[in-house]
Amino acid sequence: MARWEPNARERLVRAAVDLFTEQGYDATTVTQIAERAGGLTKTTFFRHFPDKREVLFAGQELHARLLAEALAAAPPDATPLTAVGSALDALAGSFHEDRRELGAKLLVLIAGNTEIQERSAFKHAILTAAITDGLRKRGVADQIAALAAEVGMLAFDEAFARWVASTDPSAPADRRSLVDYTRQALAELREAAAALD
């Protein structure tokens, strides 16, 4: 078992991303992922993930929970977008620097595979629903909650793309955290929304 990784689940994620990048998603088997992850077995893989597509979306449940908890904890007088901003801070704060390069590889994989794109869209919908539900629990009207959730996830997606793009050696070095990128993206979208009228 590889000693440089903290746990089997994390090793499987990294092995899968590396193999998908090297030889393609369709050409990679679960057995290859398990072996690359430090001599793990196929059985170990399936204890953590139902299939090889899901390995790319590890943490979805945690992300939805972080969003819900942060929305519940936002001050009672916070506007919907201010509460969403708090939730995005919690979500973005869970992505540490070691995830930046992994995230860059993941975006390339998503762009190049329809099956992974569909799963990514599903994850996006789950997180958007978590925000919408959290806002409704705060008493926000349905349409406003849904719109604020969509704006929030649009900001997060834009911020994530910018954050991982900073791993590109041809791009100017920018080592800001994902939280900083997300706050900037949300502020830009708020300004853009104000210009709609």
Image (cartoon, helix red, strand yellow):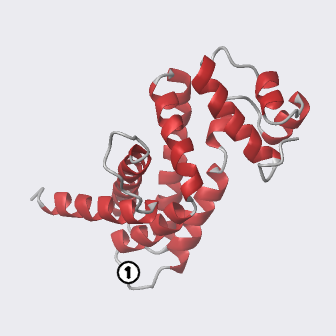
Q: Quadrant of residue 116?
A: top right
Residue drawn at (45%, 59%) of the image: 178
Question: In the rendered view, does 169 fall on the left or right side of 3?
Answer: left
Please, what secondary structure does the residue beneath circle 1 have?
loop
Pinpoint residue 15: horizontal percent, then vertical percent: 71, 34
Q: Residue furthest top?
A: 27
Pinpoint residue 175: horizontal percent, then vertical percent: 41, 59
Q: Is residue 192 above or below residue 101?
A: below
Residue drawn at (11%, 59%) of the image: 195
Closer to the camera in the image, 36 or 53: 36
Pinpoint residue 156: horizontal percent, then vertical percent: 41, 54
Look at label 1 and name its amino acid. Answer: Ala
Residue drawn at (55%, 23%) of the image: 115
Question: In the rendered view, does 36 fall on the left or right side of 177?
Answer: right
Q: Quadrant of residue 182?
A: bottom left
Residue drawn at (62%, 62%) of the image: 65
* Quadrant assignment for the N terminus: top right
Which residue is denoted by mark 1 in the rendering? 78
Q: Quadrant of residue 45?
A: top right
Q: How many callouts does the rendering have?
A: 1
Q: Is residue 1 above or below residue 133?
A: above
Say whether residue 25 is visible: no
